[in-house]
């Protein structure tokens, strides 16, 4: 048996049309999928249960959910025909504009892998784990489209799909089958399941999204900006693409609550001295906050106040025009933290110099000053350039290639709703 093989020691996993996984109960619950018991599932050392799964088929004794291995997730292929695998292979080999652009919006595809249980073999799709770099990941699955069934689905399946998440699908063309949030205030992880998602309407969905955003400690502008910029890019793609129809596909939103926590702590730290100044008839805390947090024109928006969002400042009827990032910023963003740390310590070492009489002090001082500035910039960029929120398109089990060469309106309308919702939240941060 290979190193990555999985052994399930109990009953065989069976799927039937009537016996569906019902893992969660309504509202938040504290359980992780593995607390439900994996039916004696035994995993070899390098493959583990994936506990960051927000929605979809879970491990529950009847189906197998996601597994993880070395920074990737393994998604079991539960149906005989796997259109998802075909989809990833198609976009990876295609050179047309639509596929080339699409590749940047989906998790990296790393092929397939077979895992074994009870002498049965399950094929899995291997994908980059979108949560892998985050210490306290918050994960939201938003299913896109009013129609969540493929045109080839049976009448019964169509009816089942049409009847659930009725209000949010009807009014917004989206629904929430689940999310998982590290609650900054309580320090606990809350899970919201599909039953919760099915109770939402066009108003309460905003509250659900705010729960995911930890809005009770204040909507975070940097976080919203990162999400909005990613959504704009997907929107621009969806407005132009005429190759695929994506049914029952999702956007996965992931962010690191740890970064949020840092900012909350930092906010509290600045709060005290400002409050102390109140008695000295200086501008009040609120006035100060407003002054520093004024709503900026979108063209000037910068993440963490230093990294440009890539928005050119121009809108067309196709949406915002994005420009590519300056190469220096690209370089910083793509450099690993280890590299940056090494660079910093090299610069620090260069600063530890021994003076000698032969030195030209002016020149030396200039160089030291420059080194020092570079070092500071590197340290600041380390903190500010790191991305701590992502949005990716996932779940392509019901994708159709469009024969009639039209925009996928079903998908596009869902994305448009999401953009509006997140832009509304961003607008709210301008008045805080
Ligand atoms: O409605 P069913 O019985 O077809 O089950 C749905 C699943 O169909 P499948 O098992 O693959 O045939 C369905 O899977 P697919 O997206 O069709 O692969 C979903 O898991 C769906 O859950 P939700 O709509 O995301 O809340 C599942 O629906 P619910 O569990 O919400 O009823
Ligand atoms: N590449 C990924 N990285 C991290 N989590 C993922 C990834 N793909 C899927 N997930 C998690 O698994 C859940 C279900 O994925 P999905 O592809 O929708 O499966 P299903 O076909 O069972 O609905 C998502 O809600 C998300 O939490």
Image (cartoon, rainbow, N blue to C red):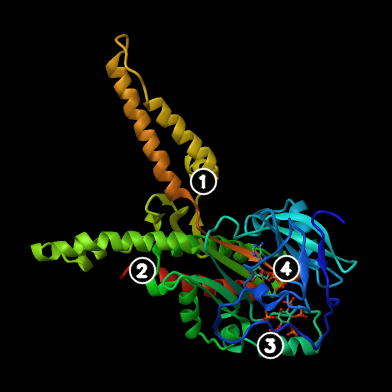
Locate the N terminus and report the quarter of the image it occupies. Answer: bottom right
Residue 161 or residue 325, whichever sits in front: 161
- Residues under numbered marks 3 and 2 in contact, where contact means CB atoms less than 8 Å apart: no
Q: Which x, y percent locates residue 350?
A: 41, 25
Q: Gap in Å between the C-alphas at discs 4 and 1? A: 29 Å
How dense is the environment of label 3, judged by Cα within 10 Å: few (below 14), some, or many (20 and up)? some
Q: Which mark is residue 333?
A: 1
Left or right of 208? Residue 395 is right
Q: How far apart in space, not on screen, are marks 2 and 4 (Cα)?
A: 34 Å
**Mark number, residue 396:** 4
Q: Nearer the viewer, residue 202 or 130?
A: 130
Of badges 3 and 1, the one in the foreground is: 1
Q: Which quadrant of the view contains residue 427?
A: bottom left
Residue 224 placement (x, y as % from top left): 45, 65
Image: 376 above or below 365: below
The structure residue drawn at horizontal position 28% and vertical position 16%, both measured from the top left corner, is 361
Locate residue 83, reporting x and y percent.
Answer: 80, 67
Choose between 329 and 386: the one closer to the eye.
386
SS class, disc 2: helix
Write the residue at 35% across / 29% down.
370
Mark 1 residue element: helix
């Amino acid at each position: 048996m290979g190193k990555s093989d999985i052994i399930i020691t109990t009953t065989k996993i069976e799927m039937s049309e009537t016996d569906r996984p019902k893992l969660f109960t309504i509202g938040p619950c504290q359980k992780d999928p593995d607390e439900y018991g994996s039916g004696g599932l035994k995993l070899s050392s390098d493959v583990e249960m994936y506990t960051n799964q927000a929605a979809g088929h879970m491990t529950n004794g009847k189906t197998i959910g996601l597994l993880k291995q070395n920074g990737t997730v393994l998604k079991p292929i539960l149906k005989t025909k796997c259109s998802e695998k075909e989809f990833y292979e198609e976009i990876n080999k295609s050179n047309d504009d639509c596929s080339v652009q699409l590749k940047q919006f989906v998790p990296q595809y790393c092929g397939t892998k077979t895992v074994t249980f009870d002498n049965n073999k399950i094929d899995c799709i291997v994908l980059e784990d979108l949560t892998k770099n985050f210490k306290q990941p918050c994960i939201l699955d938003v299913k896109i489209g009013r129609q969540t069934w493929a045109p080839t689905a049976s009448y019964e399946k169509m009816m089942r799909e049409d009847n659930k998440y009725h209000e949010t699908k009807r009014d917004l063309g989206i629904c929430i089958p689940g999310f998982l949030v590290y609650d900054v205030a309580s320090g606990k992880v809350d899970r919201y399941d599909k039953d919760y998602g099915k109770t939402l309407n066009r108003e309460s969905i905003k509250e659900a999204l705010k729960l995911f955003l930890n809005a009770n400690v204040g909507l975070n502008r940097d976080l919203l900006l990162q999400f909005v910029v990613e959504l704009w890019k997907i929107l621009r793609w969806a407005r132009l693409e005429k190759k695929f129809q994506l049914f029952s596909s999702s956007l996965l939103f992931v962010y690191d609550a740890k970064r949020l926590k840092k900012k909350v702590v930092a906010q509290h730290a600045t709060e005290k001295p400002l409050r102390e100044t109140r008695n000295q008839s200086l501008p009040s805390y609120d006035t100060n906050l407003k002054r520093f947090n004024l709503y900026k024109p979108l063209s000037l928006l910068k993440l963490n106040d230093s990294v440009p969002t890539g928005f050119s400042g121009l809108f067309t009827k196709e949406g915002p025009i994005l420009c590519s990032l300056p190469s220096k910023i690209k370089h910083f963003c793509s450099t690993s933290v280890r590299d940056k740390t090494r660079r910093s310590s090299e610069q620090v070492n260069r600063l530890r110099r021994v003076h000698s009489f032969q030195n030209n002090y002016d020149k030396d001082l200039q160089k030291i000053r420059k080194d020092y500035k570079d070092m500071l910039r590197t340290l600041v960029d380390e903190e500010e350039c790191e991305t701590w929120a992502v949005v990716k398109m996932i779940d392509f089990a019901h994708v159709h290639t469009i024969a009639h060469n039209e925009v996928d309106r079903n998908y596009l309308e869902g994305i448009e709703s999401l953009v509006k919702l997140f832009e509304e939240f961003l607008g709210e941060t301008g008045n805080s």
